[in-house]
Image (tube, helix red, strand yellow):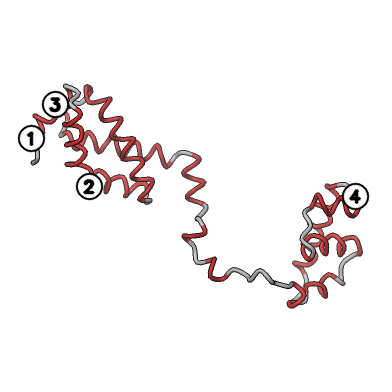
Amino acid sequence: MLASEDDLVLRLLARDEKAMAQFYQQYRPALLAAILRIVRNRQSAEDVLQEGMVKVWFAIASYDATHGRLFTWAARICCNTAIDHIRTGRFRQTARTASLEDTAVMQYAAPTDFRPEHIGVPDLLLGLRPEYRQVMDLMYLQGFTQVEAATEMNVPLGTVKTWVGRARHLLGRLPL
């Protein structure tokens, strides 16, 4: 049963939790749709809706029926909450990175028995200076980290990083 807006506002002002539950049930689909237009992620939109409902609950005393309908007021609160949400650094980070389940990359992932020798990488390394060749062999063919390669070669970590950078640059310039 849908409550009249005036009755619902009076009950919300009286801090009636059942009125808030009714408000949520009555306006949830429309508010969620408005939030989804801004956030574009169902899970984030659900979170923003919950946060918006909390704000509505605590700010109901500031609602003025002469300035607009209850739904419009609540929608403005929820949309502003959604805008605040997308401005957060955490949202921006998750928007830039997709989880592996959301991408088709997994179907193209290399098998675990991948051998670089099969594509001629060791042959490409032959054209490099000996120290570049050794560091690239350690890191890319034997799986060493930069720190491990520096320890193995008995050189500073910065030197290993420089050698890797230069080797990659030189390899990138080779004609295929």
Mark 2: few, some, or many residues within 10 Å (few <14, many ≥20)?
few
Label 2 – label 1 distance at C-alpha = 18 Å
Q: Quadrant of residue 18?
A: top left
Q: Quadrant of residue 77?
A: top left
Numbered tag placed on residue 155 in the rendering: 4
Mark found first going from the N terminus, 1 or 4: 1
Label 3 – label 1 distance at C-alpha = 11 Å
Give the camera-side residue of 114 and 27. 114
Label 2 – label 4 distance at C-alpha = 63 Å
Label 1 SS = loop
Mark 3: few, some, or many residues within 10 Å (few <14, many ≥20)?
some
Mark 4: few, some, or many residues within 10 Å (few <14, many ≥20)?
few
Give the residue type at disc 4: Val
- Which residue was labeled with disc 3? 11
**Horizontal and vertical percent for residue 60?**
22, 26
Label 3 – label 4 distance at C-alpha = 74 Å
Q: Are marks 3 and 1 in contact (CB under 8 Å)?
A: no
Give the residue type at disc 2: Pro
Q: Are marks 3 and 4 in contact (CB under 8 Å)?
A: no
Q: Are marks 1 and 4 in contact (CB under 8 Å)?
A: no
- Which residue was labeled with disc 2? 29
Q: Are marks 2 and 3 in contact (CB under 8 Å)?
A: no
**Horizontal and vertical percent for residue 165?**
78, 56
Please tell me which residue is depicted at 50% across the width and 55% down the height of the picture: 98
Mark found first going from the N terminus, 2 or 1: 1
Numbered tag placed on residue 4 in the rendering: 1
Q: Is residue 46 above or below residue 140?
A: above
109 displayed left or right of 89: right
